[in-house]
Amino acid sequence: MDDTKSAIASTGVWGGVIALLGALAPLALTAVGVKSAADQQAVVSTSLQIIAGAGAALALYGRLTATKRIG
């Protein structure tokens, strides 16, 4: 790993960003007007599981297959 690349080109960084977006999902639902607690819970529960899993998988894949350092 002698070469470097920008953080934007890092799969690991993108995986972290996706996981962060999943964590912010409840705030987004409130902002778009989903007020029912039951509706929010159903959407948040499902979306958090999908987004967090995808983000974590992408971050791990990116780190395990990395050939360049982030610079």
Image (cartoon, grey):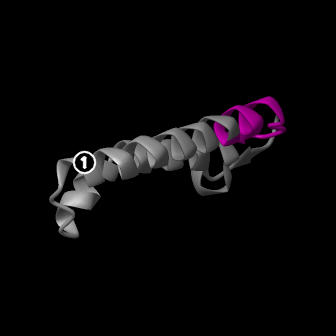
Location of mark 1 (residue) = 38
Q: What type is the residue that disc 1 sits on?
A: Ala
How crowded is the residue under tag 1: few (<14 C-alpha within 10 Å), some, or many (20+)? few
In the structure shown, which secondary structural element does the residue marked by tag 1 occupy? helix
Total labels: the figure holds 1
Where does residue 56 sit, x and y in percent of width and height? 61, 35
Q: Is residue 19 visible?
A: yes
Which quarter of the rendered picture does the N terminus lie within? top right
Q: Residue at x 76, y 36 (%)?
A: 61
Going by the image, does 52 lie left or right of 1?
Answer: left
Q: Residue at x 26, y 59 (%)?
A: 29
User: Please, is residue 9 above or below residue 46 in the view?
Assistant: below
Quarter of the figure with residue 9: bottom right
Q: Residue at x 25, y 48 (%)?
A: 38
User: Please, is residue 4 above or below residue 2 in the view?
Assistant: below
Going by the image, does 6 lie left or right of 68?
Answer: left
Residue at the far front: name it. 38
Where does residue 43 sit, x and y in percent of width and height? 38, 52
Q: Is residue 16 visible?
A: no
Which of the two residues, 30 or 42, is positioned nearer the viewer here? 42
Q: Is residue 45 magenta?
A: no
Which quarter of the rendered picture does the C terminus lie within? top right
First to last magenta residue range: 58-71
Q: Residue at x 27, y 59 (%)?
A: 28
User: Please, is residue 61 above or below residue 26 in the view?
Assistant: above
Q: Is residue 67 magenta?
A: yes
